[in-house]
């Protein structure tokens, strides 16, 4: 069954985006959610928030949505209270399942790595678990479905998926800024260049998502031989310049995820 009664420990930008989309989609009822935060946040009406966990029975699922550096403090404060929770879901970047299992006793522990577009139902959620049964896996996947694309990944690849999908929106935003800045540098008004860049990336992404061909083929369809698009692609393709830049970007992010995992062990 899909978890319906939720406790969220921490509810910042990512946790809040997930929560708002769950409630907007009808996957979760606001009055079935309790949030523990160090200070109140602007959350959907009906969601209870406090400085401590509520009394009474445990919920179906507890989600850890704090900063990874807060893990030990949360475990010291709430570990005993959460003993026996059916599902512990963690969105803490770089914190491995074994590290969570050493600090919390749960029926199942599931790692999740969402990205920020989950707030509009267009995100990515990578999942991994070593100890959940099929019913639990199905329930967690169903809970994540309203957030966007849901993919189960191997533990050994979780840091890489985190770099690609979890951090990916940040890299795309940098690209949009660069596209706009380059247009402005060639004479376009900065505000107009920004609008054009954003709309171009939005439209291209939607088209690619629904296309019958991979992005590489779509790029070739846009680029007529000897035309202006081809000339621009030649710059990106020369010595695999764009590929090398993105590879270095993901590698740096992946290394940092591994460093955080080592620190949390």
Image (spheres, grey):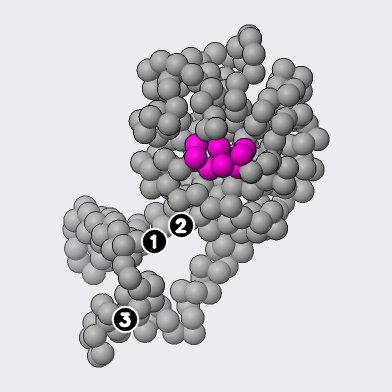
**CB-based contact (under 8 Å), mark 1 and mark 3:** no
Placement of 182 over or under 136, stated as above or below: below
* Residue 186 x/y as whole percent: 23, 69
Q: Which residue corresponds to mark 1?
A: 175
Q: SS at mark 2?
A: helix
Residue name at image x 74 percent, y 37 percent: 100
- Dot 3 falls on a residue whose secondary structure is helix
In percent of the image, x 72 and y 31: which residue is there? 107
Tell me what residue is drawn at x 43 percent, y 31 percent: 27
Q: Residues within 10 Å of mark 2 (few under 14, many from 20)?
A: some
Side (left or right) of 85 relative to 162: right
Count of marks placed on residues: 3
Q: Residues within 10 Å of mark 1 (few under 14, many from 20)?
A: some
Whole-percent x, y for residue 85 in the image? 68, 25
Of 165 and 110, which appears nearest the observer?
Answer: 110
Residue linked to disc 3: 220
Where is the C terminus found, in terms of image quarters?
top right
| CA distance for labels 1 and 3 | 20 Å
**Disc 2 versus disc 1: distance between alpha carbons?**
6 Å
Upstream in the sequence, badge 1 or badge 3? 1
- Which residue: 55% across, 63% down? 249
- Seen in the picture, residue 74 relative to 115 is either above or below; the reply is above
Question: Image quadrant of residue 189?
Answer: bottom left
Compared to 247, does 32 lie above or below? above
Region rendered in magenta: 135-144
Specify the principal SS of the magenta part. Answer: helix
Image marks 2 and 1: residues in contact by CB distance under 8 Å = yes
Say whether disc 3 or disc 2 marks the residue closer to the N-terminus.
2
Whether 74 is among the magenta residues is: no
**What is the number of the mark on residue 171?**
2
Considering depth in this image, is 256 or 46 the residue closer to the camera? Answer: 46
């Amino acid at each position: 069954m899909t978890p319906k009664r939720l406790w969220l420990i921490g509810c910042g930008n990512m946790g809040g985006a997930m929560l708002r989309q769950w409630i907007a989609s009808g996957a979760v009822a606001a009055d079935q959610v309790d949030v523990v935060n160090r200070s109140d946040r602007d959350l959907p009406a009906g969601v209870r928030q406090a400085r401590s966990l509520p009394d009474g029975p445990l919920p179906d699922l507890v989600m850890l949505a704090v900063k990874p550096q807060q893990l030990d403090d949360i475990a010291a404060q709430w570990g005993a209270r959460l003993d026996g929770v059916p599902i512990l879901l963690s969105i803490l970047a770089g914190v491995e399942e074994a590290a969570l299992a050493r600090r919390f006793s749960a029926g199942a522990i599931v790692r999740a790595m969402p990205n920020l577009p989950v707030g509009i139902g267009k995100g990515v959620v990578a999942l991994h678990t070593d100890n959940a049964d099929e019913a639990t896996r199905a329930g967690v996947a169903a809970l994540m479905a309203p957030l966007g694309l849901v993919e189960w990944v191997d533990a050994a690849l979780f840091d890489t998926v985190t770099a690609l999908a979890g951090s990916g929106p940040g890299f795309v935003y940098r690209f949009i800024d660069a596209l706009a800045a380059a247009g402005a540098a060639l004479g376009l008004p900065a505000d107009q260049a920004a609008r054009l860049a954003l709309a171009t990336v939005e439209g291209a992404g939607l088209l690619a998502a629904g296309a019958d061909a991979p992005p590489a083929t779509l790029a070739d369809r846009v680029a007529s031989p000897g035309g202006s698009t081809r000339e621009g692609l030649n710059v990106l393709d020369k010595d695999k310049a764009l590929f090398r830049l993105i590879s270095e970007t993901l590698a740096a992010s992946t290394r940092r995820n591994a460093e955080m995992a080592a620190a949390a062990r």
